Image: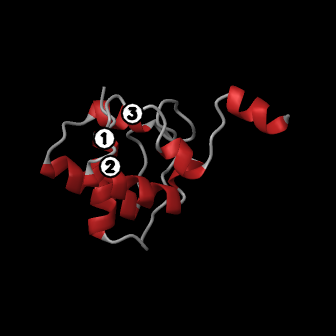
Amino acid sequence: MIAVAMVACGQQSGQNQAQAKPLKDNSSNPDYQKGIELVAKNDCLSCHKIEDKMLGPSYRQVANKYENNEANIKMLANKVIQGGQGVWGPVPMTAHPQLSEADAQQMIKYIFLLKN
């Protein structure tokens, strides 16, 4: 009964939340698949959701704010690794120094695929 209530309220966990409501079918896109894997196995979904703002902005808000280009992929990947504060409000994003630059960039490529 509790599980049904959680699903009805939109509570999803792990990889299921990372896959929620893509605007188009990206299932065959390698950037999408690798990005889901990285987001699901790191702590990203503790602070971010695809559609709704949580502690941090939703992935769609991020995707819609920035143009999908190499400069922004590198800049945002750097923010994921080093952490940051101020762009989306006073709550700081925790640094993720364990991530490689390639993995962080892959996560950003996935997020950009969620753009409206």
Mark 3 in CB contact with mark 2 (< 8 angstroms)? yes
| Colour convention | secondary structure
Location of the N terminus by quadrant is top right
Q: Position of residue 33 (x, y in %)?
A: 35, 53
Q: Tell me: residue 22, above or below residue 42.
A: above
Q: Give the alpha-carbon distance from disc 3 to disc 2, as whole Å.
A: 10 Å
Amino acid of disc 2: Tyr
Q: Nearer the viewer, residue 3 or 54?
A: 3
- Tag on residue 85? none
Left or right side of 67 for 53? right
SS of the residue under disc 3: loop
Q: Which residue is mark 2?
A: 32
Q: Which residue is mark 3?
A: 22
Q: Are marks 1 and 3 in contact (CB under 8 Å)?
A: yes
Q: Residue furthest front?
A: 28
The picture quadrant where one finds residue 8 is: top right
Pick whichever, 70 or 106, lies toward us: 106
Residue 83 vs 48, above or below: the answer is below
Can you tell which quarter of the image residue 59 is in?
Answer: top left
Q: Residue furthest left?
A: 70
> In the orientation shown, which residue stands out farthest toward the right?
1
Q: Which mark is residue 26?
A: 1
Please name the amino acid that badge 3 sits on: Pro
